[in-house]
């Protein structure tokens, strides 16, 4: 529900390439909400809450006017809710140009026109004789090969025409681009200019001369070159006004030929217009082989001839239909948020405008439709139509001389013909890009059909950058390696067609190769598009290798991801040779259990984390084998965060296997409990209630075998006591198991008596487990600790009616009523709700194997920020579960990396004040029930916690956040997540490698007033620290597995015990923060009220001293004594107490 963070700029298209607003943050009402949200979190709950509008009785029952009735009727027909209509109208208001800005842009365009037509002419020279060019300007084109026939002279344009979306009224803020077509006079051009880049050379020289003269004009603040839609053969000249309007508009000048100058039959996709002899510098082959066709080259020439005809077509179709224009604007926002219209070969705003025209011409869209309906219709068409297989055409002519769609399919990946039937509008769009558009359209239609309340927010206001949308990404860097790949793949015709652009030439074959290799592991493969550069007129144009890196995004299928086997055909099948050729030395013959002998590829992967990274092995192997791209040039980003949740000795595993072993041991124990003989009542249910049993414990337990030298044995209790002269022993946390007994009329009805009976059951349970199964047990009145296979389980006996007995309150008159009490709520949470939650999340892990890694990374990060004490395990597990149960507008994560990024985004942008986070476990809540929950939430907001998480079993009270966090702590988490997300995404998208990935996990210590530094000797989990120490102390565990007859020390963590003492003694003066996973620092923040002078009271002198102020005795904190007490309380554990006195004064 929160604001979408700003994205990056996107380019538009041929004839109407504009850039969209970065997620609209900070503009208008939405932006104001966004900027104020974080400020208001720390305010009292009543402030900043959304409140219903109060109307007088007369206003409430006033008859609607005709205008209001018409508005309601339109809303019902054209939108599916009033809220959606309001949201769409607000969005369109934000992205449209105001009339004042239009007037200023029009005035600038008139000035540009006057100056362009006054540029002086130049006498005719040979194309290769460029001595006439002034010294301060360079030709904005790579002239390779340099030698080319033809003559050039400059004449002012015959016509200056504004084309594109500005005239149509469909361009959107904030970066407004206005495209201006300069029709070059016929005298400049010659008949054969379509050959061998002659036209493009003349076009570039035309721009160079214009640039030299316009750069001297004081009207322009910036004059530079760029590429039209990223096509390096078609530069354009960018003009920006000087002064305060510099960012108002960018005017892009596009030289073009007269519309009927080139003969269309010469520019068909089957024709060749770049001769091999000229391009390669070789004499033509004497075998009579035909020249390879140059479809992309031909298309780029045709595009320039069609600028005005496309504008006329769009004007005719969209001119008076405001709904169609609104729909185009919404589609551009949709593309912008998904980064689909960026760079060369993007699915641009011009393409969706022409798609709307196509759907109008085929009567799938009516001109009276609203913008929302147009958006739905176009998305539905994209979701169900594959233009890579069945192209479409705007041409209605039946002229037999026109090429067939099949000709275009042979030459291009995606086919969408304009009204002439000769120009493919999608010529530069790759199959991968179109499949990504299709996939996003399908997701969007599912979201719209669900009619979710936040559908608008998720569809049009949530950005989907590649690193957050795809499970794994890989960077190919440097791009110059793709030149060698073109040679290896023998892509000479493609290089000739693309004018030497080896990135574009290699992209299609490269993605096809990887899609084939990844097979069933892959759901979608997408690639980044090279960004469109800008450069000064005195600089040479950038080279292909200067466009950064090529990034590929892999969306993976969890069901096929972890398979280590690629199964090929049987050895005697003809396909076996192709399989061997494709996989190279990796392919080998294997005999399988059914007796078949097949070709197969086996990948090395033992743990789940290694299996998740099998695509890395596939990609690097295929690229090295088929394209000569070495592994050093492939920077694969799939598991850099895994190191944060790896155990000390498990550098190749992220702990899933250890968790599975613990869960398996629990299953064995539950079977033993079910089969116990001799209990007065039989066991009715055994339920896990610990993070390990739902796969979300950050560092899973391992079987323990204590070393006797570290302990003093207490034989009478069969337990151990840590020795003072040894380092603190390993931390062992028992796993809680709830054991329900069957109902019986013999249970007492008194709360204290029930507790005594339960205590007797705990003792009996320990006896029977020891007698019947030889397990080491230690019983207390509240639980029984059981040692099994090196794991310790804490069994709590539960009686189903005990919470109800604790609710019984007797009035003075003897009447008994039921009322929630702290004891009853606590018991119900521990014995009923926690086991249910553990069971539901255990099931979620079976459906989504990445859930464990995401939840554990999320908890590791929160605790590393020293905030873990304020957030319960269960609350963070539920936030992680929401990413899988409600992933819109994404799909559920298949890797911990992308899940963690989405966790940071959710925490930093969710409107915690005005919305509950609904986690619909097992899909038990209907849409109506969720609406009811939201209504009840707003009505009861002031009585609810700051952070509200709703589940099907907990619809009103948010039990997992009742005890925290406070508003200030939640606000701190939101701020930290908002800072960590862009930093981590930038690291992961760095083509040179992510660098130090632990940076975002290190806590900011400069915000604390006092730092208490602890001795590693007494930190039992020291090795779990974010920056794991190279060496630490031995923790008294034997490395050899084996049975142990002694119960290990449980839950012994000196820093936690020290923190309890600090909070008990100084909780009224300060807040204490600590990372329980090996933290060496406790951060202390003084409470704002602690330094305010208090009236003297003899009963409250703890930690205070008496001072005289204004003749009165007052009490203020005795900071020196408090800091000394910190050290005294932690003697032996505390190394230093560091006071940051510059941050506070008494």
Image (spheres, rainbow, N blue to C red):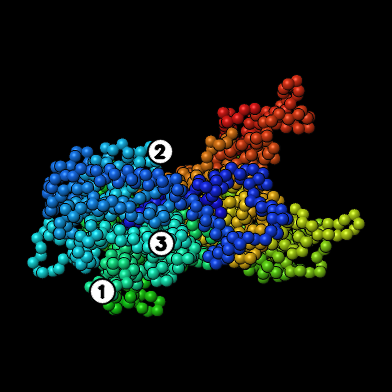
Q: Which residue is mark 2?
A: 244
Q: Which residue is mark 3?
A: 318
Residue at the extreme right of the image, as rendered: 813
Instruction: Name the side, left or right, on which 1005 lies relative to 340.
Output: right
Query: Residue 399 shows which numbered tag?
Result: 1
Report the label total: 3
Q: CA distance from mark 2 to mark 3?
A: 33 Å
Q: Is residue 532 visible?
A: yes
Front residue of 746/888: it is: 888
Front residue of 665/92: it is: 92
Lower sequence index among marks 2 and 3: 2
Lower sequence index among marks 3 and 1: 3
| Residue 106, percent from left and from top | 37, 47
Q: In the figure, 969 relative to 492: above or below? A: above
| Residue 905, percent from left and from top | 51, 52
Instruction: Name the side, left or right, on which 666 lies relative to 422.
Output: right
Instruction: Name the side, left or right, on which 231 lies relative to 751.
Output: left
Q: Is residue 1043 visible?
A: no
| Residue 634, percent from left and from top | 33, 54
At a point 55% along the width and 59% down the height, the residue shown is 85
Front residue of 910/701: it is: 910
At a point 37% along the width and 61% down the height, the residue shown is 314
At a point 35% along the width and 63% down the height, the residue shown is 313
Q: Secondary structure at mark 3?
A: helix
């Amino acid at each position: 529900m929160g604001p979408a963070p700003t994205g990056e700029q996107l380019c538009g298209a041929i004839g109407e390439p504009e850039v969209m607003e970065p997620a609209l943050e900070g503009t208008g009402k939405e932006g104001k909400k966004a900027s104020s949200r974080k400020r208001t979190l720390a305010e009292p709950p009543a402030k900043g809450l959304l409140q219903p509008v109060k109307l007088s009785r007369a206003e409430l029952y006033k008859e609607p006017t005709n205008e209001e009735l018409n508005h309601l009727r339109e809303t019902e027909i054209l939108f599916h809710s009033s809220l959606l209509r309001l949201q769409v109208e607000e969005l369109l208001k934000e992205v449209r140009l105001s009339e004042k800005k239009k007037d200023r842009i029009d005035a600038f365009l008139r000035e540009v026109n006057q100056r362009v037509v006054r540029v002086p002419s130049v006498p005719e020279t040979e194309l290769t004789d460029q001595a006439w060019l002034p010294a301060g300007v360079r030709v904005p084109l790579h002239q390779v090969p340099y030698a080319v026939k033809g003559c050039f002279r400059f004449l002012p344009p015959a016509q200056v025409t504004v084309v594109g979306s500005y005239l149509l009224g469909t361009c959107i803020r904030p970066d407004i681009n206005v495209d201006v077509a300069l029709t070059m006079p016929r005298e400049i051009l010659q008949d054969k200019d379509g050959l061998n880049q002659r036209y493009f050379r003349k076009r570039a020289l035309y721009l160079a001369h214009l640039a030299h003269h316009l750069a001297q004009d004081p009207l322009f603040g910036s004059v530079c070159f760029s590429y039209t839609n990223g096509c390096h053969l078609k530069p354009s000249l960018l003009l920006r006004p000087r002064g305060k309007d510099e960012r108002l508009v960018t005017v892009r000048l596009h030289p073009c030929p007269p519309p009927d100058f080139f003969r269309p039959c010469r520019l068909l996709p089957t024709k060749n217009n770049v001769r091999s002899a000229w391009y390669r510098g070789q004499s033509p082959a004497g075998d009579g082989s035909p020249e390879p066709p140059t479809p992309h080259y031909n298309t780029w020439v045709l595009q320039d001839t069609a600028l005005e005809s496309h504008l006329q077509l769009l004007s005719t179709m969209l001119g008076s239909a405001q709904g169609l224009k609104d729909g185009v604007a919404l589609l551009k926002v949709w593309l912008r948020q998904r980064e689909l219209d960026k760079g060369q070969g993007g699915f641009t705003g011009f393409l969706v405008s022409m798609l709307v025209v196509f759907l109008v011409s085929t009567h799938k869209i009516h001109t009276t439709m609203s913008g929302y309906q147009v958006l739905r219709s176009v998305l539905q068409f994209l979701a169900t139509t594959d233009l890579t297989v069945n192209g479409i055409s705007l041409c209605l002519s039946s002229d037999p001389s026109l090429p067939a769609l099949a000709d275009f399919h042979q030459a291009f990946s995606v086919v969408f013909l304009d009204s002439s039937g000769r120009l493919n509008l999608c010529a530069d769009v790759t199959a991968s890009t179109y499949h990504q558009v299709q996939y996003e359209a399908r997701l969007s239609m599912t979201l719209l059909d669900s009619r979710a309340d936040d559908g608008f927010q998720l569809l049009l206001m949530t950005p989907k950058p590649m690193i957050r949308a795809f499970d794994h990404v890989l960077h190919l860097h440097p791009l110059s390696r793709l030149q060698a790949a073109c040679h290896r793949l023998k892509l000479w015709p493609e290089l000739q067609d693309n004018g030497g652009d080896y990135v574009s030439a290699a992209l299609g074959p490269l993605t096809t190769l990887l899609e084939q290799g990844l097979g069933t592991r892959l759901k979608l493969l997408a690639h980044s598009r090279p960004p469109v550069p800008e450069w000064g007129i005195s600089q040479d144009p950038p080279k292909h290798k200067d466009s950064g890196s090529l990034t590929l995004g892999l969306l993976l299928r969890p069901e096929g991801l972890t398979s280590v086997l690629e199964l090929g055909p049987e050895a005697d099948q003809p396909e076996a040779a192709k399989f061997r050729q494709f996989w190279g030395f990796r392919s080998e013959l294997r005999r399988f259990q059914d007796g078949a002998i097949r070709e197969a590829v086996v990948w090395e992967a033992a743990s789940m984390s290694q299996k998740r990274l099998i695509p890395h092995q596939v990609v690097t192997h295929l690229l090295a084998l088929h394209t000569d791209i070495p592994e050093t040039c492939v920077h694969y980003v799939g598991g850099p965060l895994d190191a944060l949740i790896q155990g000390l000795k498990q550098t190749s595993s992220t702990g899933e296997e250890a968790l599975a072993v613990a869960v398996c041991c629990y299953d064995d124990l539950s079977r033993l409990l079910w089969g116990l003989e001799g209990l007065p009542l039989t066991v009715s249910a055994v339920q896990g209630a610990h993070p390990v049993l739902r796969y979300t414990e950050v560092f899973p337990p391992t079987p323990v075998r204590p070393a006797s030298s570290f302990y003093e044995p207490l034989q009478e209790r069969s337990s151990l006591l840590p020795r003072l002269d040894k380092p603190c022993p390993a931390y062992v946390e028992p796993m809680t198991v709830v054991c329900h007994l069957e109902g019986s009329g013999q249970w007492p009805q008194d709360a204290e008596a029930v507790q005594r009976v339960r205590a007797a059951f705990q003792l009996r349970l320990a006896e029977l487990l020891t007698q019947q199964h030889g397990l080491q047990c230690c019983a207390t009145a509240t639980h029984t600790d059981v040692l099994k296979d090196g794991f310790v389980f804490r069994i709590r006996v539960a009686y189903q009616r005990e919470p109800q007995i604790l609710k019984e309150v007797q009035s003075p008159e003897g009447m008994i009523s039921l009322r929630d009490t702290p004891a009853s709520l606590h018991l119900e949470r521990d014995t009923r709700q926690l086991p249910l939650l553990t069971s539901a999340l255990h099931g979620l892990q079976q459906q989504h194997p990445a859930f464990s890694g995401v939840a554990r990374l999320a908890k590791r990060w929160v605790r590393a920020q020293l905030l873990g004490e304020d957030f319960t395990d269960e609350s963070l597990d539920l936030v992680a579960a929401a990413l899988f149960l409600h992933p819109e507008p994404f799909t559920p994560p298949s890797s911990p990396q992308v899940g963690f990024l989405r966790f940071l985004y959710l925490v930093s942008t969710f409107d915690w004040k005005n919305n509950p986070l609904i986690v619909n476990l097992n899909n038990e809540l209907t849409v109506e029930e969720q609406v009811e929950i939201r209504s009840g939430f707003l009505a009861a907001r002031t009585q609810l916690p700051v952070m509200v998480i709703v589940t099907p079993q907990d619809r009103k009270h948010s039990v997992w956040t009742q005890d925290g966090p406070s508003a200030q702590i939640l606000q701190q988490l939101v701020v930290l997540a908002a800072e960590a997300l862009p930093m981590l995404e930038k690291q992961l998208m760095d083509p040179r490698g992510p660098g130090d990935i632990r940076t975002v996990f290190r806590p900011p210590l400069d915000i604390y007033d006092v730092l208490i530094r602890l001795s590693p000797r007494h930190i039992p989990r020291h090795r779990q620290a974010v920056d794991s120490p190279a060496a630490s102390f031995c923790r008294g565990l034997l490395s050899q597995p084996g049975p142990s007859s002694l119960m290990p020390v449980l839950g012994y963590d000196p820093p936690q015990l020290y923190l309890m003492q600090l909070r008990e003694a100084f909780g009224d003066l300060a807040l204490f923060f600590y990372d329980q996973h090996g933290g060496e620092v406790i951060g202390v923040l003084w409470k704002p009220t602690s330094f305010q002078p208090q009236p003297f009271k003899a009963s409250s002198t703890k930690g205070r001293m008496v001072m005289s102020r204004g003749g009165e005795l007052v009490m203020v904190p005795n900071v020196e004594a408090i800091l000394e007490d910190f050290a005294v309380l932690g003697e032996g554990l505390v190394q230093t107490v560091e006071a940051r006195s510059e941050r506070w004064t008494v």
